[in-house]
Image (cartoon, rainbow, N blue to C red):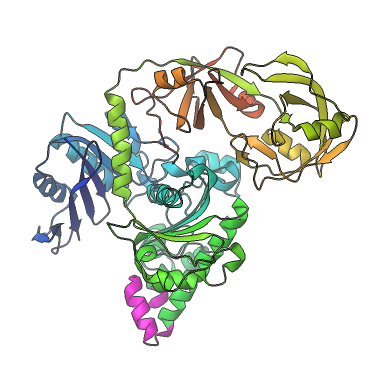
Amino acid sequence: MAILVLNCGSSSIKADVFTRDDLQRLHSFRVERIGTPDCILKSGSETRTLGNCDHASAIGQLLLAIDEPIEAVGHRVVHGGETFIHPTRLTDTVLDTLRTLTDLAPLHIPANIAGIELCQAHFPDVLQVAVFDTAFHATLPRRAKTYAIDQDMAEKHGLRRFGFHGTSHRWSAEQVAQQMDTPIDQLRLVVCHLGNGASVCAVEYGRSIETSMGMTPLEGLVMGTRAGDIDAGVLMTLMQKEGWSVEELDRFLNKECGLKGLSGVGNDMRDILERAADGDDRCRLAINVFVHRLRKYIGAYAAVMGGVDALVFTGGIGEHATVIRARVCQNLSFLGLRLDEDANTQRPSTEKTVVEVSHYASRNKIFAVRADEEQMIAKDTQHLLADCDKVTTPKGIPIAVSARHLHLTQEAVEILFGKGATLTVKAPISQPGQFACNEKVDLVGPKRTIKGVRVIGPVRPACQVEISRTDEYTLGIDAPIRNSGDVGNSPGVKLVGPAGELTLKEGLICARRHIHMDPASAEAFGVEDKDVVEVAIDGSGRDLIFGDVLVRVSPKYVLEMHIDTDEANAAELRPGDLGILASSNTLASLRRKQV
């Protein structure tokens, strides 16, 4: 049995067949120039002319060329809107919802839906799965996805940043983590997907926290035919001076700008590089603008994450244009990034997915990664297919609200409460061995002080202060969302106790949503340590779902989901509320394995 992955673009189709169990690629098919007399179907070294055919006839001929029995089909869908933030089993209801999102990606969603409907007709009894380009960016913090416009108007029309190329960014991040032999939840990566469409993503500890594309794929980098970032005043001027309609402006920005508009010779970087070498000034300008914009984003994303452990290039340009990689990496030594000119001549391949191109003396790493979105889609489809083989019953997870608190070292305890002081028990808390202490301290920030913050015992190897988003504004400190215990490169805060003061250099965080599980509960739920899931609130009467919830498994834990006070208040949670771990039969949770 096999898994088929179908990627329907506006003028091309990619299809790959994988073995179900170990995801070995069996066949690759490519249909190019759909809608023209030159439409062709490629399979290995063979090329067949299809004539002037549309998506339906092209997909029909492609499906007839597949000999393997297909057990599941994974579809790339460009835009999931607010609704779809994980791989989703396709039903009539899901398709109806997808049709309402056409305005967000008018060139791509109709083609995506055409591919889905044809596969449903060709494989009527086969699992069909949608994997969304926007899903990886569902973890964008509110400050990164919000446009600075009137928020009533933004909410009315759904105007916010979504991001794209998420499957490629996730694939590249996972491949680099494996290459570095480091858990992905310990890495800060800047991933550059560079092709005819191009975007950058800040992947902080396995989660997308910033990306260059916005509500549509028009925002961000210079692309093949898209302008990327542009002053809105330029657009209004063009409409006024040229008398353009919205449709004409849309065509200009999507089809006539970017490298094509800058160079005057087209959107293919290979041609532009060749002409630039021959002295073409417009092509040289196109390269300079492309590189400048990209380098600017890399620096910005390193600043957002407080540093970068690796810079990653992928996509057609990112993998093959060694000159572009070299130009981009110039003057990045202040980030600890230094390119090796000889190593940079290497390109990733089927045999070697990841190639390191950083200098041996580079403090941080630089990689080129072979893009393989189809492999990632096959992996997500495989997970849902495995879930369909299970008989699962939703189980309740007690919800616990974590008020602001802190953990201290023994040294800190003695500084704050006096020499020889120890933590004293006020009351045990739900997790075995932990307790609320009688001891409290004040948190002093640049703006205000929060008094009487309780210490949680026992003592720990490092100090850690956990606060809510509201507390951030009270203190005047921007605290990152982190897994408990991950305090590197986090801000510090001043602690004031009855016997002394202590200024922490780091340790102030907003704790990421997480579930404590003992091994038996993890086995019952079918999850593992460091899986990332979604949780629905049982009996809420609303579509209340918490995404990006980290699973933590240990024999020392008792089953419980922890959220902070802000989220509990916003969700109107009450004592005794339960969460339901989403499964493929309910909400199709995304088990995004951390390396």
Pick the front one: 274 or 439? 439
Relative to 579, does residue 466 appear above or below in the rendering? Answer: below
Image coordinates of residue 27 in percent, x first then y, are: 17, 49
Left/right of residue 82 with respect to residue 348 in the rendered view: right
Q: Which residue is depicted at the point 29% across and 36% down?
A: 381
Residue 264 located within the stretch drawn in magenta: yes
Left/right of residue 517 with respect to residue 258 in the rendered view: right
Q: Identify the residue at the far top of this view.
A: 576
Image coordinates of residue 7 in percent, x first then y, are: 26, 48
**Quarter of the image that includes the N terminus:** top left
Main structural element of the magenta stretch: helix, strand or loop? helix
**Which picture quadrant has residue 595?**
top left
Q: Which residue is depicted at the point 52% across and 42% down?
A: 185
Image coordinates of residue 565 in percent, x first then y, are: 66, 26
* Residue 516 visible, this orientation: yes
* Residue 265 visible, this orientation: no
Q: Which residue is depicted at the point 10% across and 60% down?
A: 46
**Which picture quadrant has residue 367?**
bottom left
For the image shown, how many numbered marks are present on the structure? 0
Left/right of residue 235 with respect to residue 283 in the rendered view: right
- Span colored in magenta: 261-281
Left/right of residue 529 with respect to residue 43 in the rendered view: right
Residue 493 located within the stretch drawn in magenta: no
Q: Identify the residue at the far bottom of this view.
A: 279
Relative to 548, does residue 490 appear above or below in the rendering? Answer: below
